[in-house]
Image (cartoon, grey):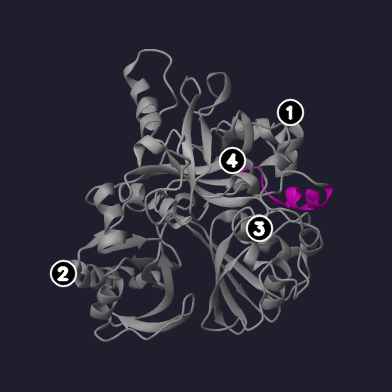
């Protein structure tokens, strides 16, 4: 019997955790661009030393919202303040459940007084659409699905991001004039290849950048001019492999599990969500295992979004967040020990008792990765994203840790691999768990691990 809604699917499962941990869905894919244009090491290096072009035209969903109540709807759902927000600005938009847990995060563009666009992963867009349809708002919404979920090969808009020390030089040459001065996350309109483009002032790991977007039919001539402009400045196009790893240096956790699988207050929403949608087909993986799905949820503070929370407006989850006045978990980078990583990879040269395969540059093997981080055997947090930075010559993870263990220089252990040889996910081969030592490091990870270890530290001989 097929299940029509997410609620139907959950009712038939033993638990949400078991359903998601055995889901056959692998890691998020980045369609539309090849895995590599040159090689992923070269492409990683470009965003730190020259300039990189990320083609974001294919892998994200876009939700257009228009109408007299559009801003009211967004303000009602976002933890963010909307004071002063309007045309010419963008915002990192974070909605929460009534219990104060994050559903997702997307970029919100104010395109007009009553016209907005949300760009990113599906969970936050689904939440906004649900409230637009059921909340009595005078708005119109239109979803433009990512390429992997469509058959026509077209999108409403293209989206190119230029990042790196030479990004503004490339932009100036493409425009044929000096780019207008823009504050961070402000927008304007420019002309490239005779085509009008929207432009967002962006940035990544301290490097300047612009994001250009416009009608799909203008994509190819704009791309051609950008590539030609970048030739003398060392521009590289980033393939899917490099793109999936850029967050390790910038510090953004790209895939928090949407906190919608439990709670009576969300039952109507689960009955609205299809069983075959993002939430119903998502997968959990990693060494962190709890019987309670709530243990996989994050608050805004867990993800580094605490500064976004503003109690200057009424929004879903406000009351719960106001009561979260205790010690919050903190987002950090973990720099994994080189020798332990080498040992783990070295098990691939055995016929038995291998560790979980470590792929490069991204080692994430499911949609929502949760690996245990421990101190003296006790769990003190979870690692959510893991991979290799050629720029730093390190395996890094993005983790959320208890505040008592989140100071840079703290020594922790990452448990790599799943219990009992692994779950039923196709991306998981039989393996044995292993422990990899790590050091808590700043986020974003700007330089090599800080030299602040105790004299008797296992790290001291290596620094």
Q: Which comes before the other along the chain, label 3 or label 1?
A: 1
Rounded to the nearest angstrom, the CA distance separating label 3 from label 4 is 15 Å
Single out the residue that lies furthest toward the top.
352
Query: In the image shown, does 448 or 255 lie closer to the viewer?
Result: 448
Rounded to the nearest angstrom, the CA distance separating label 2 from label 4 is 43 Å
User: Circle 1 sits on which residue?
Assistant: 14
- Whether residue 198 is situated above or below residue 308 in the rendered picture: below
Q: Residues within 10 Å of mark 2 (few under 14, many from 20)?
A: few
Q: Which mark is residue 300?
A: 3
Image quadrant assignment for residue 288? top right
The secondary structure type at the circle numbered 4 is strand
Tell us which disc is closer to us: 3 or 1.
3
Q: Residues within 10 Å of mark 3 (few under 14, many from 20)?
A: many
Query: Marks 4 and 3: in contact by CB < 8 Å?
Result: no
Rounded to the nearest angstrom, the CA distance separating label 2 from label 1 is 58 Å
Q: Residues within 10 Å of mark 1 (few under 14, many from 20)?
A: few
The secondary structure type at the circle numbered 2 is helix
The region drawn magenta spans 264-277
Q: Which comes before the other along the chain, label 3 or label 4?
A: 3
User: Circle 2 sits on which residue?
Assistant: 232
């Amino acid at each position: 019997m097929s299940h029509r809604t997410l609620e139907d699917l959950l009712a038939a499962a033993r638990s949400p955790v078991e359903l998601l941990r055995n889901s056959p869905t692998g890691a998020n894919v980045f369609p539309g661009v090849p895995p590599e244009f040159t090689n992923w090491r070269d492409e990683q290096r470009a965003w730190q030393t020259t300039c990189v072009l990320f083609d974001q035209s294919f892998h994200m969903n876009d939700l257009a919202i228009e109408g007299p109540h559009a801003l009211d709807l967004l303000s009602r759902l976002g933890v963010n303040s909307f004071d002063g927000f309007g045309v010419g600005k963008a915002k990192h938009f974070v909605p929460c459940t009534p219990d104060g847990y994050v559903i997702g995060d997307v970029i919100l563009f104010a395109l007009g007084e009553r016209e907005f666009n949300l760009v990113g992963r599906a969970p936050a867009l689904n939440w906004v659409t649900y409230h637009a349809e059921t909340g009595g708002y005078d708005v119109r919404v239109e979803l433009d699905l990512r390429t992997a979920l469509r058959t026509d090969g077209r999108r409403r808009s293209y989206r190119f991001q230029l990042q790196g020390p030479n990004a503004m030089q490339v932009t100036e040459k493409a425009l044929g004039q000096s780019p207008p001065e823009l504050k961070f996350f402000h927008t304007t309109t420019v002309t490239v290849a005779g085509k009008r483009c929207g432009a967002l002032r962006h940035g990544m790991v301290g490097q300047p950048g612009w994001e250009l977007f416009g009608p799909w039919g203008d994509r190819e001539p704009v791309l051609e001019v950008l590539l030609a402009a970048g030739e003398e400045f060392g521009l590289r196009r980033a393939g899917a492999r490099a793109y999936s790893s850029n967050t390790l240096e910038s510090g953004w956790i790209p895939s928090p599990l949407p906190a919608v699988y439990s709670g009576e207050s969300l039952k109507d929403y689960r009955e609205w969500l299809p069983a075959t949608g993002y939430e119903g087909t998502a997968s959990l993986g990693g060494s962190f295992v709890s019987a309670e799905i709530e243990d996989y949820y994050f608050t805004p503070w867990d993800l580094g979004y605490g500064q976004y929370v503003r109690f200057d407006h009424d929004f879903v989850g406000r009351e719960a967040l106001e009561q979260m006045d205790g010690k919050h978990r903190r987002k950090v980078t973990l720099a994994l020990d080189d020798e332990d990583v080498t040992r783990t990879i070295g098990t691939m040269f055995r016929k038995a008792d291998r560790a979980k395969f470590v792929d490069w540059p991204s080692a994430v093997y499911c949609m929502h990765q949760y690996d245990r981080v421990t101190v003296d055997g006790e769990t003190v947090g979870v690692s959510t994203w893991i991979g290799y930075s050629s720029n730093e010559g390190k395996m890094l993870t993005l983790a959320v840790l208890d505040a008592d263990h989140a100071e840079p220089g703290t020594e922790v252990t990452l448990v790599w691999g799943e219990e009992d040889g692994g779950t039923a996910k196709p991306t998981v081969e039989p393996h044995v768990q292993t422990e990899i030592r790590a050091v808590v490091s700043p986020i974003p990870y700007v330089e090599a691990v800080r030299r602040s270890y105790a004299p008797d530290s296992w790290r001291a001989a290596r620094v």
